Image (cartoon, rainbow, N blue to C red):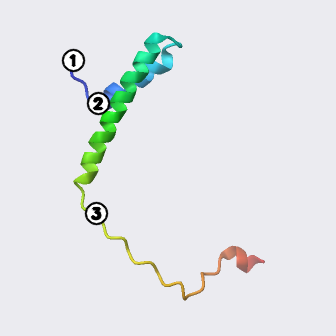
């Protein structure tokens, strides 16, 4: 049976939350860990396909910081 990875993760989370401490829970958590690792790999591949945005230049520090409303009240 083929499932979407996200659906499999949700199902494993639900199963882990409702299963008492037992060897079965250990197996469920191992499956969940593997599914999360696969999801992480997929997201890394997806992110690698996006262009890198140039970091905008920072403003000069020569100007004083703006006066806040709180400073005006005092």
Instruction: Find residue 44 and report its horizontal and vertical position in percent.
Output: 29, 46
Residue 11 visible (yes or no): no
Instruction: Find residue 21 and report its horizontal and vertical position in percent.
Output: 53, 13
The circle drawn on residue 5 is: 2
Residue 74 visible (yes or no): yes
Instruction: Estimate how packed mark 1 is, as few (under 14), some (14 to 19) or many (20 or more) residues with alpha carbons within 10 Å.
Output: few
Instruction: Estimate how packed mark 3 is, as few (under 14), some (14 to 19) or many (20 or more) residues with alpha carbons within 10 Å.
Output: few
Report the label total: 3
User: Is residue 2 toward the left or the right of residue 27 in the image?
Assistant: left
* Residue corresponding to mark 1: 1
Quadrant in which the C terminus is drawn: bottom right
* Residue corresponding to mark 3: 52
Q: Which one is closest to the eye, mark 3 or mark 1? A: 3
Q: Are marks 3 and 2 in contact (CB under 8 Å)?
A: no
Q: Residue at x 40, y 78 (%)?
A: 57
Q: Which one is closest to the eye, mark 3 or mark 2? A: 3
Numbered disc 1: secondary structure: loop
Q: Residue at x 32, y 70 (%)?
A: 54
Circle nearer the N terminus (3, 1): 1
């Amino acid at each position: 049976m083929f499932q979407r990875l996200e659906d499999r993760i949700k199902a494993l989370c639900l199963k882990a939350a409702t299963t008492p401490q037992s060897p079965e829970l250990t197996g469920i958590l191992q499956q969940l860990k593997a599914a999360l690792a696969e999801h992480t790999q997929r997201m890394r591949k997806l992110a690698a396909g996006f262009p890198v945005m140039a970091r905008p230049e920072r403003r000069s520090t020569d100007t004083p910081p703006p006066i806040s409303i709180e400073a005006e009240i005092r």
